[in-house]
Image (cartoon, rainbow, N blue to C red):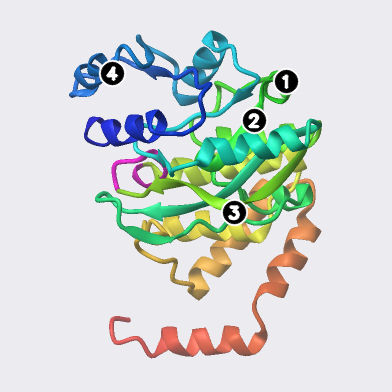
Amino acid sequence: MGRYLEETIQSVLMQDYPNIEYIVMDAGSTDETLAILEKYGDRLEFHSSPDDGTADAINKGFARSHGSVFAYLNADDIYLPGAISTAMRSLAAEPDMGVVYGDANWVDEGGQLLAPYPVRPYDAALFSQECFIAQPAAFIRREAFELAGRMDPNLQYAYDYDLWIRISRLFQMRKIDGVLATSRMHKENKTMGQRRRVLRETLRLLESHYSYVPFQPVHAYASYLVDRRDQFFEPLRPSIFKYVLSLLVGLRYNAGRPFRFVHEWAGVISLEGLARRWRGFMERPDR
């Protein structure tokens, strides 16, 4: 991620909020990362040593920090101007709020806009269906992060999602106005480059927290098993086979609530839609 790091650093250092303690945790990079960090050594604190993954690195960085509000950025994400001041004003106005989060944009390798991140207004119940918070645009009170148990270092991909669920059971969270950050989407990041593991860990997370995994994440995982499409740059393509496979996968992850999943699964597509897709499958020239 060295080629993105300087832009990330500058996006923090150029914020107009005066009280920023900036700590960079590096796992022992062998690219240009250390040279870049040394260049800014008088304006940030950095540590380079092995860790047990991103969640572990975040916990280690938090343990070194002192501020009452905590946030973290991946090496390829950036804050937009005024992001921290906007978040801090909101937190100051609502002292009992555990997390505030704003809007964010997905950008490509060159920083060009791809699409707005699908952020939603806060609804704790919605976490049982999806993760609707853009992590780079989220700011957390220290107390909330501590009481929720910090990051789970056993998670390698869905640690943000897990954290939001745990905090939501202890504190209020609120969406605030404004686009605060960008999240860079490219084949080298963990979300895209290790798609199967990301989707599978999400299923296990939902199973652990809610004892039920809904149709949409199950279908996403089943579809990836079939065609290996990343479902971002390569949109998900529904098919009868994927739909049927999602029933088998869903029953595997919902062994304790099979009838609930079958009911949800059956309600996703009408008989007319199923027949239309079957006809399309039968008429395919490559059959």
Q: Could one spot residue 19 in this view of the protein?
A: yes
- How crowded is the residue under tag 3: few (<14 C-alpha within 10 Å), some, or many (20+)? some
- Which sits in the foreground, 159 or 275? 159
Query: Is disc 3 in contact with disc 4, using a CB cutoff of under 8 Å?
Result: no
Q: Nearer the viewer, mark 2 or mark 4?
A: 4
Percent across and percent down for residue 79 are 44, 40
Q: Is residue 1 magenta?
A: no
Task: Compare marks 4 and 1 and give the one earlier in the sequence.
Answer: 4
Query: Is disc 3 in contact with disc 1, using a CB cutoff of under 8 Å?
Result: no
Q: How far apart are marks 2 and 3 (CA)?
A: 35 Å
> Badge 4 is on which residue?
40
Q: How far apart are marks 2 and 4 (CA)?
A: 25 Å
| Amino acid at the residue labelled 3 | Val
> Badge 1 is on which residue?
143
- How crowded is the residue under tag 1: few (<14 C-alpha within 10 Å), some, or many (20+)? some
Query: Is disc 2 in contact with disc 3, using a CB cutoff of under 8 Å?
Result: no
Percent across and percent down for residue 56 are 50, 18
Q: Is residue 189 magenta?
A: yes
Q: How far apart are marks 3 and 1 (CA)?
A: 38 Å
Task: Compare marks 2 and 3 and give the one earlier in the sequence.
Answer: 2
- How crowded is the residue under tag 4: few (<14 C-alpha within 10 Å), some, or many (20+)? some
Bounds of the magenta segment: 187-193
Secondary structure category for the residue under label 4 = loop
> Badge 2 is on which residue?
140
> Badge 3 is on which residue?
249
Query: Is disc 4 in contact with disc 1, using a CB cutoff of under 8 Å?
Result: no
Horizontal placement of 178 versus 53: left or right?
right
Q: How far apart are marks 3 and 4 (CA)?
A: 49 Å
